[in-house]
Image (tube, rainbow, N blue to C red):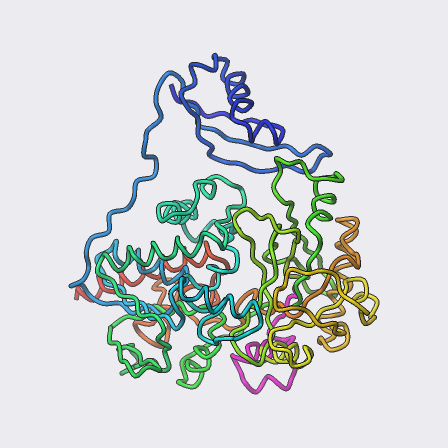
Amino acid sequence: MQTQIQLILSPEQAEKHELLLAQVAKQTKVSADRISSFRTLKKSIDARSMSPKINLTLDVFIDEKAPENKYQPLEYKNVADKEPVIIIGAGPAGLFAALKLIENGLRPIIIERGKQAEKRKIDIAHLNLNKNFDTESNYCFGEGGAGTFSDGKLYTRSKKKGNAQRIYEIFHLHGASEEILFDAHPHIGSDKLPVVVGNMSNTIRSSGGEIHFEEKVVEFLIENNAIIGCKTEQGNTYNAKVLILASGHSAHDIYEILYNQNIELEPKGFAMGVRVEHPQSLIDSIQYHCKTRDEYLPAANYNLVEQVNERGVYSFCMCPGGRIVPAGSGKNEIVVNGMSASKRNSPFANSGMVVEIRPEDIPEEFKEFGAIAGLKYQQYIENLAYKNNGGLGQKAPAQRMIDFVKGKVSADLPDCSYMPGLISSPLHFWLPDFISSRLREGFKKFDQKMHGYLTNEAVVVGVETRSSAAVRIPRDPETGCHPQIEGLFPAGEGSGYSGGITSSAIDGENAALFVKKWFDSKNAK
């Protein structure tokens, strides 16, 4: 017999097999020896009370064995001799688009400016030591995209665009742990993602697809308002009737190329701010209502949002047990982001804290750039952070949190996970008042929700500017194609229609399905 049950347990009961088995037997009203096995379908933490609880949904098998292979791998046929489709970018949108194209009998040709994950590790190690910055191989560019070495969070609020669970299953089938299939906030971890995305790349190549690393697109080839291919900086030309543009929102030069080739773009709202880091023990004590976190509980996280002067101020990409990393893509800019390893066992907790920016908020001096005005403003803030780090490579300007709120220069800084190092800087002074004033008020309001959040144990690190794209590449909602250029299919974060790994992966799959329909319509004529 197979049955589904729900349990509310202590963290220890949920973690220890013998205690969990006893609770399953009690709930199903059968002896423990009759329970063949059980599988976790959903798992979440309820920390609202003084004693946090674990909510579990289980599939229980009584007097019968569970099916051995619940998640059947997809069979990818060889498409080496099929119609080619160019994909720019090997991030989640690009990789999942490629897999979906193969499912549908089309041959993906991925062009990725960065390196394979294994080679990329070396460049990132140098970057973390503030020794060298490779503008084409860093936290932004390379196999797997920005998510590979900056956390691998899979949680998404977007439920309408596609099947998120299937995305998790494909990650699992390529090496991610089974926990991502049932955790309320699934997370692969930057220590595991390089292997996972490498396995996905192997699937694409073994099915007849191509991946060209260390090739940077510099021109889109267009005839009669239709894509015919692209050129790379390395002197290569790739030809195809269709191009999926999945380059990510940090590929600023792609927007510049589109802009200079008079390909229609649109301004969109985005957000900028800082990254805030606390001791993880402090966040644990606030969220779990305790002095010391229960050994069976994970590092606590938080999600904060407020309205300040008609603009949203909110946390973004919260990383419990994580660290802050240098996430820029140019040498004359400072950008920070956060990541966690799979165990989330760092003594620090960090989160982006950003302010909503609408197109009408862009200062007048940037308006001459039209649709890419927001991009230019973003670059200005990143360059400003670089100018305020004392010319010390990737060292980041920083300030204690209460000092930031009070407009006071920090005489010293607390320990921080950011490996290139920090330099004390008056962020309250040089950040645009539109951002800094709202952050100050936001921090005060957050402290009312999480008492103890506003503290000089916390450090504010500048700047967090890449929570989302500042530009949208328009596309027809019915066809997925750019309205001006036939055969151009924007996808992923860089298109301005998705954010995060899962929603970008879904968007990539959807782009591939639009491409299949496009070919079907052409062949039907």
Look at the image and tell me in which quarter the N terminus lies: top left
Q: Residue at x 30, y 71 (%)?
A: 487
Of the pair 21 and 257, the residue shown nearer to us: 21
Q: Quadrant of residue 386?
A: bottom right
Q: Residue at x 56, y 31 (%)?
A: 15
Describe residue 181's horizontal placement relative to residue 316 as left or right: left
The residue segment tinted magenta is: 354-378
Of the pair 348 and 301, the residue shown nearer to us: 348
What is the count of numbered marks? 0
- Measured from the top left, where is residue 393 in percent x and y? 60, 77
Describe residue 408's horizontal placement relative to residue 14 as left or right: right
Describe residue 20's horizontal placement relative to residue 200 as left or right: right
Q: Quadrant of residue 430?
A: bottom right
Of the pair 279 and 352, the residue shown nearer to us: 279
Describe residue 236's horizontal placement relative to residue 197 as left or right: left
Q: Residue at x 33, y 29 (%)?
A: 67
Q: Magenta region's main secondary structure?
A: helix
- Measured from the top left, where is residue 291 in percent x and y? 76, 40
- Measured from the top left, where is residue 327 in percent x and y? 55, 68
Of the pair 232 and 344, the residue shown nearer to us: 344
Q: Is residue 23 rendered magenta in the image? A: no
- Measured from the top left, where is residue 299 in percent x and y? 63, 45
Q: Is residue 370 rendered magenta in the image? A: yes
Question: Vertical placement of 487 versus 233: above or below?
Answer: above
Question: Vertical placement of 521 versus 392: above or below?
Answer: above
Look at the image and tell me in which quarter the C terminus lies: bottom left
Question: Vertical placement of 490 versus 234: above or below?
Answer: above
